[in-house]
Image (spheres, rainbow, N blue to C red):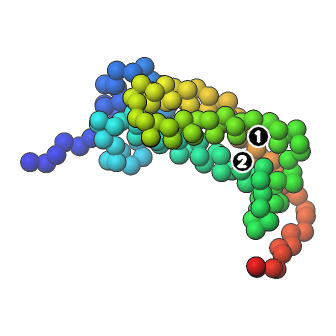
Amino acid sequence: MEKDKFKLKEEYSQLKAKLPNFEKLNDEFEISRNESDYKKEFLLRDIRRKMNDKIIFFCRIIEGLLFPVQANIINMHESKYFDDDIKKKILESYRQLMIFERESLRLDIIPNSEKDAKYINNVYNELLKYKKEMKNVVDIMQESWRKEEKIVPDNYFG
């Protein structure tokens, strides 16, 4: 007998916790991608982890701008186009995103379904603010490449 296929949207709608609208959450975090990876008994945990992937993605972009390394010419180039005021604002966003990321890590260490649901709601609601800011960051990054500037990579390889 063939095992019943897991239906994420149906299982999500049966959760007891008050959560964001499935379609909106899916649109923001692509939670239905790799649907077969989810397990009914760990659904909230799996969704939280999927959401945390996007948080980590945003953090890595910001890290490259705030803490560029000489070995990465892309980050070195783009970070020059962010003044100190913008960097301070980005750093504050980075701090909050890292709080979310570390909360998810804590929930991996000490699982708690109620806290998973709270995390899902908090991140969903807060991310809308950060998306607008991240769009502005990406606009500056992209615009930096439109500037006529000679890019000369350092030929020293270690």
Residue 83: which quarter of the image?
A: top right
Frontmost residue, 111 versus 7:
111
Identified by mark 1, the residue type is Leu
Question: Percent from the top left, x then y, of residue 13?
Answer: 34, 26
Amino acid marked by disc 2 = Ile
Confirm whether residue 55 shows in the render: yes
- Residue 136 numbered mark, or none: none
**Is 112 on the left or on the right of 135, as rendered?**
left
The image shows residue 125 at horizontal and vertical percentages of 58, 26
How far is disc 1 from disc 2 in space, using C-alphas? 8 Å
Specify whether 75 is left or right of 39: right
Residue in the image at 27% along x and 41% along y: 6
Q: Nearer the viewer, residue 30 or 53?
A: 53
Q: Is residue 48 visible?
A: no
Front position in the image: 81 or 123: 123
Rendered view: 70 above or below 86: below
Question: Picture coordinates of residue 148 (x, y %)?
Answer: 90, 62
Instruction: Give how far across and how far down residue 102 sits, in percent.
Output: 57, 39
Q: Quadrant of the C terminus?
A: bottom right
Quarter of the image where one finds residue 15: top left
Q: Residue at x 81, y 79 (%)?
A: 156
First in sequence, mark 1 or 2: give its number.
2
Which residue is at 67% across, 34% downward? 96
Q: Which residue is mark 1?
A: 91
**Residue 62: image tag:** 2
- Looking at the image, residue 126 lies above or below residue 83: above
Q: Residues within 10 Å of mark 2 (few under 14, many from 20)?
A: many
Residue at the extreme left: 1
Pointers 1 and 2 in contact (C-beta within 8 Å): yes
Q: Secondary structure at mark 1?
A: helix
Q: Secondary structure at mark 2?
A: helix
